[in-house]
Image (spheres, rainbow, N blue to C red):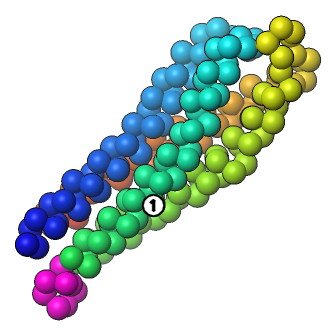
Amino acid sequence: MEPLLYTINLAAHNLLLVFCAAAPFYQLRMVNKRAEFGKRLIYEYDKSIEDLLSVQPRLCFWFIVGLIATGFAFPLIYYGFHGEWQQRTPFIYAVLAVKTLLVFLGFGIVNYGMFVIDKQIQNVFRQFKPEEAPPQDQLDAFFALRAKRKRFCKICLGLAVAILAITPLLRFY
């Protein structure tokens, strides 16, 4: 039964990590494509982008919560079947500490993106009207906030790739 629970937990953990990595990857592709049109408002296009991108941090929030839960489930599964904590090398504990730090750093960025940056972008975008050109100061603020979100998105993608790269070390060493 232990291998089955471990396998199910590992599958869930890996899927959540892939979802976390895919979100900023595709978000960056979308904003890079939009950048080809310059810093002018294309209302319907920008509205559809904002509708999609405002959901991303919320999804990532829940993906990371799932990652944390399934991550802590690994030692609990072992403990449940063996009555003791699995003995690991100091190297593995160091890798685990780095991975945990990266996950919580990503969680902080997602929360900042969700509760600060996205709200600011949505507040600015609500002032725009489909039939009229926005004032330049609002447009500048809008694209500056988008650039800020893009920088944080790149960091999240880097964190996800780093986590994906170090995760196999926990299994085999």
Query: How far across and how far down the image is residue 145, in percent?
Result: 73, 34
Name the residue at 19% across, 84% down.
Answer: 80
| Residue 8 is covered by the magenta coloring | no
Q: Is residue 1 left or right of residue 84?
A: left
Residue closer to the observer: 111 or 52: 52
Report which residue position mark 1 lands on.
65
**Figure quadrant of the N terminus:** bottom left
Identified by mark 1, the residue type is Val
Q: Residue at coordinates 74% horizontally, 35% vertically from top-left?
A: 121
Q: Is residue 35 left or right of residue 167?
A: right
**Above or below, comparing residue 52 to residue 101 in the picture:** above
Expressed as whole percent of the image width and height from the top left, the position of residue 130 reads 79, 12
Q: Position of residue 149 (x, y in %)?
A: 64, 37
Counting from the top left corner in percent of width and height, residue 166 is at 29, 55
Q: Is residue 31 left or right of residue 117?
A: left
Name the residue at 59% across, 42% down: 152
Asked where in the image residue 25 lies, by quadrant, the reply is: top left
Q: Vertically, is 85 above or below 10? A: below
Residue under the point 66% across and 52% down:
112
| Residue 82 visible somewhere in the drawing | yes
Give the number of callouts: 1
- Callout 1: few (<14), some (14-19), or many (20+) C-alpha neighbours within 10 Å? some
Write down the quadrant of residue 64 in the picture: bottom left
Depicted 45 relative to depicted 9: above or below: above
Secondary structure of the residue carrying tag 1 is helix
Hey, which quadrant is residue 9 in on the image? Answer: bottom left
Q: Is residue 131 above or below residue 153?
A: above
Q: Quadrant of the C terminus?
A: bottom left
**What segment carries the magenta color?**
78-86
